[in-house]
Amino acid sequence: MTTTVQTDFHTPAASGLLLEKIRSKQLTVGVMGLGYVGYPLALTFSESNIKVVGFDIDENKIADLCHNRSYIHSIDKSRLKTVRENGFFTATSDFSGISACDAVVICVPTPLTEHLEPDLSYIIETCKAIAPFLRGGSLVSLESTTWPGTTKEVVRTLLEKESGLKTGKNLHLCFSPEREDPGNKKFQTKNTPKLVGGVDKTSTDLGVELYSLICEETVPLSSAEVAEAAKLFENIFRSVNIALVNEMKVILDKMGIDVWEVIHAASTKPFGFMPFWPGPGLGGHCIPIDPFYLAWKARESGAATRFIELAGEINRAMPKYVVDKAQDCLNEYGKAMKGSKVLILGLSYKEDIDDMRESPSLELMRLMEEKGASVDYHDPYFPEIPSSRSYQNFAGRKSRPLSNGYDCFVIATKHSCFSPEEILSHGVPVIDTRNFLPRKENVYQA
Ligand SMILES: NC(=O)c1ccc[n+]([C@@H]2O[C@H](COP(=O)([O-])OP(=O)(O)OC[C@H]3O[C@@H](n4cnc5c(N)ncnc54)[C@H](O)[C@@H]3O)[C@@H](O)[C@H]2O)c1
């Protein structure tokens, strides 16, 4: 379904001009931040024959793009090559190029500080970097996940101060959350409804027009704050339900009941139930992090966030639960964790993607090494562990093949290239956190 937009532009000529450019596809879109969100988004605009300039501070990414090298595994380099050859995509670290853009989409990281508080420094730096080059009448859309109020309180304030432009007059600003589900073959940018909330009605309308160029359905909202809160709610919903199913796993295991069979059984109910699956803990840039953004902002208004805190607590306890299970398993073979050789299968936080941010596999490695085990990993998506903020000491370690030289395997991620037969052929006991293997004597659910 395509949303028909009833735009009612009685605002200054600036917005009329932009509207005309969008509708005739004669605009240039700037994408700030070419990571997991910005890079595919830039390609999607380019593939719709819209001129895109991609910006990033990471010179390696720019060099890769300029040489048709695709640094995200699921994006084929032929897509990049085609849009570059057709003249619809260029990439640069020179932000003065913003002056050629009619719309700028911000897709920079929103991590947490070491005290688990929102870190908006990337958004702030980006605003400061683009403001001097912003054209009068342009549209800025923030896609980075953040607390409700950021677009108005932080982005608008900075852009207006540093550019001299004014929202409602010659600057348009909206929030439109990215809902990318990496590796999802069914839902991508085009067929995932796009929420758009502007700081004023004209900004919402222009945002809807912009995203209608690449999305089948756009959903205009009454404000940027509603869009910001909706994105957080979606991820908190997942975090809470994953925590619930992880708690069910622990309870049912003690009762000798198979949680996976229980979930499958409950899923046969055609209404009022939606399955979530247990695992070794939360991973990725979103689910483990985003709930803290709302919790932090809620404190300001004195609201309690009990579900959010509890879900975080349960999910964060999962790697330790898995390690305890591995310890029990080794015990059965007369071995201690200390001195055992363990191979973790899967480093990515979910199957079939090359993203290990916040992956519970890394925490499993850390916990088992703390107990004296010697831990290797096996993951075709990561021949070598890249540098990461929290697990820097693992950087440079290399993926090892499956072999019978290990005391146990731990399946942390069920990449579809893994073969149950091959895993079982080594005769090594396996801790299976993903229900990947058939029930066998030496397979332990965790
Ligand atoms: N990855 C996902 O699946 C996903 C899904 C939905 C929402 N999000 C949100 O989208 C945002 C971006 O996430 P991501 O996964 O693409 O992050 P990422 O780390 O993969 O990419 C961010 C990019 O921004 C660049 N960057 C940092 N500062 C910059 C600056 N000042 N100017 C230009 N570029 C800059 C980085 O070099 C990097 O290439 C985050 O807020 C995240 O929470 C991510």
Image (cartoon, helix red, strand yellow):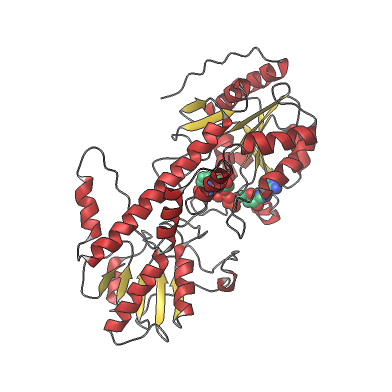
190 lies above or below 370:
above
| Residue 90 in the figure: left or right of residue 116 | right
Q: Quadrant of the C terminus?
A: bottom left
Picture coordinates of residue 47 (x, y %)?
Answer: 55, 35
Picture coordinates of residue 269 (x, y %)?
Answer: 20, 42
At 21% from the left and 56% from the top, the residue drawn is 261
185 lies above or below 174:
below
Instruction: State whether residue 76 appears in this view.
Output: no
Q: Quadrant of residue 188?
A: top left
| Residue 326 in the figure: left or right of residue 111 | left
- The one nearer the camera, 443 or 325, is 325
At 64% from the left and 18% from the top, the residue drawn is 20
In this view, which residue lies farthest toward the front? Answer: 302
Picture coordinates of residue 247 (x, y %)?
Answer: 32, 58
Instruction: State whether residue 421 appears in this view.
Output: yes
Q: Quadrant of the N terminus?
A: top left
Picture coordinates of residue 342 (x, y %)?
Answer: 40, 78
Q: Quadrant of residue 162?
A: top right
| Residue 289 in the figure: left or right of residue 321 | right
- The one nearer the camera, 164 or 386, is 164
At 46% from the left and 28% from the top, the residue drawn is 217
250 lies above or below 324:
above
Q: Exactly how many numbered labels are in the figure?
A: 0
